[in-house]
Image: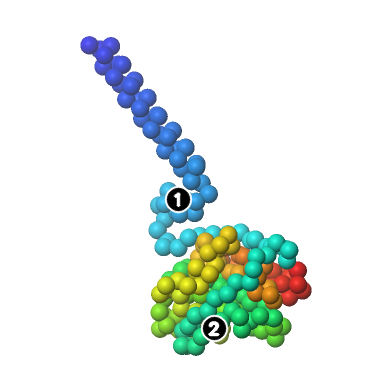
Amino acid sequence: MRDAIKRGGRRRALAVVTAALAVGALLAGCSNDELAKQYTSGEDKNYIAGSGVTELKPAARADPIDFSGTTEDGTTFSSKSARGDVLVVNFWYAGCPPCRAEASDLTKIAEKYQPKGVKFIGVNTRDGAATAKAFDSEFKVDYPSILDADGGAVQLAFSGSMRPNATPTTFVIDKQGRIASRIAGDIAAQPSTLTTLIDSALQGQ
């Protein structure tokens, strides 16, 4: 009887160890999934944290990307209107903490590069006009944002291999309308990275 109890205990212990190993393997397999990381860490941010810079040489860039939409002021912005200029596109929404952290840096960079022929456009992925305007006022953002929450047409336009898979994400579009580079995650810790990528696009690199 005692031997049977001991054997049963060993089987239960082995089952627990096996289950733990299986969970560990599953989590290891998801280690590159930002949502999985947030879930396993117990975080509930309602945004996907990201970091990393991707820059494409001119020969490796895809076809020009076309998008348009209505801004918080009711005007229409089209990416085709920026052909011949470098265009910086920032995906954001007001309740995203990293978006708030980087807002002042984006505003300063936009002001610095406007005389050099660089345009900035935001793409708000969740909010209505009133919320976007309140954000602009709070952070003194003076460039427009397309309201993309209803339908997500701009997000779909960027749905290829260089999609905005983090919030925020900032793209630099070259003078031909092609994606030149992408920063996944906020620029607050690395504003000089964005300026370097803009300078590179201005020089045709």
> Quarter of the image holding residue 121?
bottom right
Residue for point 50% across, 41% down: 28
For label 1, the SS is helix
The residue under label 1 is: 36
For label 2, the SS is strand
Q: Which of labels 1 and 2 is toward the front?
A: 2
- The reply to whether the C-beta atoms of the residues labelled 1 and 2 are less than 8 Å apart is no
Q: Which amino acid does label 2 sit on?
A: Phe
Residue for point 58% across, 60% down: 161
The residue under label 2 is: 77
Q: Position of residue 60 (x, y in %)?
A: 70, 61
The foreground one among 46 and 119 is 119
The foreground one among 146 and 109 is 146
Q: What residue type is labelled 1?
A: Ala
Q: Tell me if I can see residue 158 in this picture.
A: yes
Residue for point 33% across, 22% down: 11
Q: In this view, does 14 lie to the left or right of 51?
A: left
